[in-house]
Every structure is written in C-alpha cells, then in structure tokens.
Image: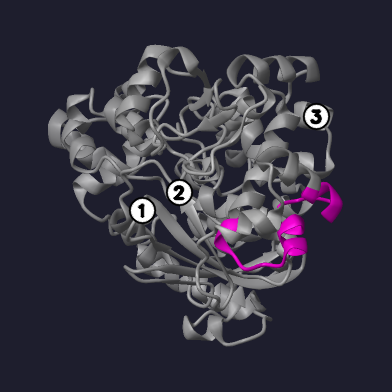
Amino acid sequence: MLPDDDICYRALVTRDARFDGLFFTCVTTTGIFCRPVCPAPTPKRENCRFTASAAAAFEAGFRPCLRCLPEKAPSITRAEGGTSVVERALALINAGALDEGSIADLASELGVAERHLRRLFTKELGVSPISVVQTRRLLFAKQLLDETSLPIVQVALGAGFKSLRRFNDVIRTTYRRSPRELRRHAHRAPAGTGITLKLPYVAPYDWSALIGFLAPRAIPGVESVTHERYARTIELDGHHGMVEVAPCADEHALQATIAFPDVAALVRIVDRLRAQFDLGANAPEIAAHLARDPRLKGSARRRPGLRVPGAWDRFELAVRAILGQQVSVAAATTLAGRIVRAFGRPLQMDGDAAARFGLTHLFPTPENLADADLAGIGLTRARAETVRAFAAAVAHDPALLRDPAHMTDCAVQRLTSLPGIGRWTAQYISMRALRQPDAFPATDLWIKRAIEATEGHVTPKRCIEIAEAWRPWRAYAAFHLWSMIGENTNEG
C-alpha cells in the first residue's frame, strides 16, 4: 500500500533508498514522475502527488524522469504481502499472461471475476492490468536503450512491441525524444558476449548467503556457482542459451549477462531472473517484521538482506527437492548430475561461453523423465517411482507448477496428493519454485533444532504455532533459522 503522503515527502527530502520502488513522486509543475532517490532539487510539498506504481503515474499523465530513471527502480509495480490476488496477478503478468491472453483469462486463472480483478487493481495500484503491462514494456525498452547496443528494432522486439512504428510513437510521446536521441545520452556497457543488464533491488542484499546456499546445490552441467557469480543453461520456446549473474560493485543491483538467440524473450528472461534471485522483496520491511520476535531478532538484525532463493525452472527445482528427501545435499546433487547426464538434453548454442563454465546440458523435461529408467543411476525404487509419477503429472498438467493462483495451503495440498511427496517437499517447492513467501517447512529437522535452541523440545505442531508470528514472511523466517543453525548437511 502507498505510504502516508507525509512519510513519502520525508523520504523524498532525505532521498531514502529504503522507499525506492515503494512509491513514485509526480511533480505537477514539470509533468515528470521520479523515484524517491532522485538527485534533482526537491520540489515543494504542494507540487507533489504520490503514486504506488509507475503505471499510475503514467496514467495520470506524467512522464519518466531522465535523471533518476524510474526503469531502474527495484520495482515499478508492487503489491503488499505476496499472497494477495493482485500480487499473484502481477506474478502471472510477469510470466507473460497478458502477452497473448486476455484479462478475462487472467481472472479465470486467479479464480475471481474479471470485474473484481479490475476493481482490486484500481484499489491497490490505481491502474488497470493493461496499464501495468504497457508501463512494464515501455520502461524495459528504456533500459534496453540505455544499457545495451541492440539495434533499435531489436529493442522494440525485446520490450514486447509488435511494430517499430508503434515503438517510436510511444517513446517520442512519452519522452519527447526519439529512441536515437535518448540513446545519445546513455552509458552502455562495453560490447561482449551476450546482453548485459542491471537488475536493481531494495538494499541490503545478502549475496554471500544466497550464493552459499546455491553453490552446494548446483546441478553439474546445468549450473555453475562461485562466490563471484552464478551461471546456468536456459531454454525458452525451443531456443537454448545461458545466463550469468553477478553483484554490481557500485550500485544496488545484480548484473545479468544473457546469451540467447531470441531477443523477444529478453523481458521473460529478466523477470525469471528477478524471481530466482528474489529481487522484488522489500528486505528492510521483512527484516523489521521478523525482528519483532525475540527468536529471530538477532539474525534479522545481523542479516537484514537475507533472501529466499528461487528457481529458474520449477520442474527442475521440484525434482531436485524430491531427490533430496532424507539424503545429504551432496548426495542429492550427485543424483541430479547423474539424471542430467543420462536424460538431459545437450546444450546447443554458438560460441564457447558455456564451455568456460562447464555448462553442457539442459535439465530433462517432464516428458523425458516420465518413462525414464532411473534404476541405473542410484535412486531407490520408491524414489524413482516418485520422480516418474511427478514428471508424468506435470507433463499431463503443466499448471501444477504454474504461478500459484491460490494460497500456500492449496499449493501444498495439490503437491501432497501426488505419490511420494510429503509436506516438507511440498512446502520447499512452494517456497522456492512457486515463490510463496509464507511457505514454511515445519517438519524440517534443522528448523526444529534452531527453535529448540531457545524453546527446548518442540513438536512440528508447536513449530507451526510459533511461526504464526512470522506471517506473511515465514519462508524468510525459515532461511533465518537455517542460517542460525549453520549450513544444514541434509537436504530435507
């Protein structure tokens, strides 16, 4: 929700980075909207209007500032809590739900009436779903102009415009300059292998904790993780490629280098990377909420930038979670590597960029594993049957791992209805693959031990009762508990 106007103005006066992406300032005397951190002289209070999203500022007739660059805000459209209908709708929109589908289709996916969905968007964001899509498209185009050397026509395609003429008209109307005029003032990264873009976040960001979690779980041939960077193979619409992500030294952003043959997929790739690295989280707000509980106060203050690592590919993450049931992280990683070597698809892309990181394969598809003979790679008979049954279920109904249209409990119920998948695995998948911020694996041994350090012996039921105070951020609480007990040696 939009902060109080007085709070917004104080944040604007002090250029408080904690509010970056939480609101935008529309200056009535200039017709421009800015981020709270804009370096321009602060406008008078009576000349300021505040909106909860860049889309609302656009719809009110304001154009983006060319000094603070709203496209570089950690979030251009935010809804609170992570489990509201609007938040779930935004997740589906970011996954491309309105690129081809209609608002009626989106509402149906969410289980609400179209009119109700429009009303919720107007109430929470001040705009319609279509305005959100148009704003996202425009600001991503501006980022491509600023940060890449892509030809203008490829910038238009990469941002989702159907024609170059429409792209030119929108840019000129919005910025009062042509795309080429805007590009003259840009500071682009040197040309190299792939397209390099910056992915902003609300500071702080605990890169070392996130990469420390991902490194021992990296799937050989598919992922490569060091303290300095994360790299992996990717596939969209039949095209193969790779991405490399590293922290920026001079600003609150990660830097993504994308090597992919289809420029039209750029916006989807960026959205998936933002989800994988949890860049949309309001870290200070989450840490402050968790610090209210004495059990988490110390960890939340020591590590306020702790994030919940997501997943590039939900099916891949889910299979990895199944492999990790009741075995060590190292053993699960070994099994995942064997599956990739036996059933994965060889990476097909030009150049040697992937080979430098030892990236050779794409993870198997659900169809690849549904009938796979897994006996020869070291899986128990029961675990092999679970993997095959899960793969068959996803192949039959891909919506099983789609962005959740329901709350965490509903997602867990759907997953645990499948043979061999228990509540821990379902909660873990919900937390990381489905991006449910309130998922909580209460039966986890290491979470139990972390709570017992202050509470004495507890049951899973008691863990759930204690965790009620951490809603709606129980997934973040889980990662704080894991960090408190030290790196766990078991996956599940």
Query: Given contact means CB atoms under 8 Å apart, are the residues at marks 3 and 2 in contact?
Result: no
Q: Main SS of the magenta segment?
A: helix
Magenta stretch in the rendered image? 144-168
Q: Is residue 85 visible?
A: yes
Residue 383 vertical placement versus 304 (above, below): below
Closest to the camera, between mark 1 and mark 3, is: 1
Horizontal relation, residue 442 to residue 95: left or right: left
Q: Which residue position holds label 2?
A: 200
Relative to 106, residue 487 above or below: below
Badge 3 marks a residue whose secondary structure is: helix
Amino acid under disc 1 = Glu
> Is 173 or 489 nearer to us in this picture?
173
Task: Write down the quadrant of residue 3 in the picture.
Answer: top left
In the rendered image, the vertical position of residue 245 relative to residue 62, given as above or below: below
| Cα distance in 3D space between marks 1 and 2 | 8 Å
Q: How is the image coloured?
A: one colour
Q: What number is the disc on residue 251? A: 1
- In the picture of the structure, the residue carrying the numbered disc 3 is 103
Above or below, 28 relative to 420 = above
Name the kind of residue labelled 3 in the image: Ile
Residues at marks 1 and 2 touching, judged by CB atoms closer than 8 Å = yes
What is the secondary structure assignment of the residue under circle 1? loop
Answer whether residue 75 is magenta in the image: no
Q: Is residue 149 magenta?
A: yes
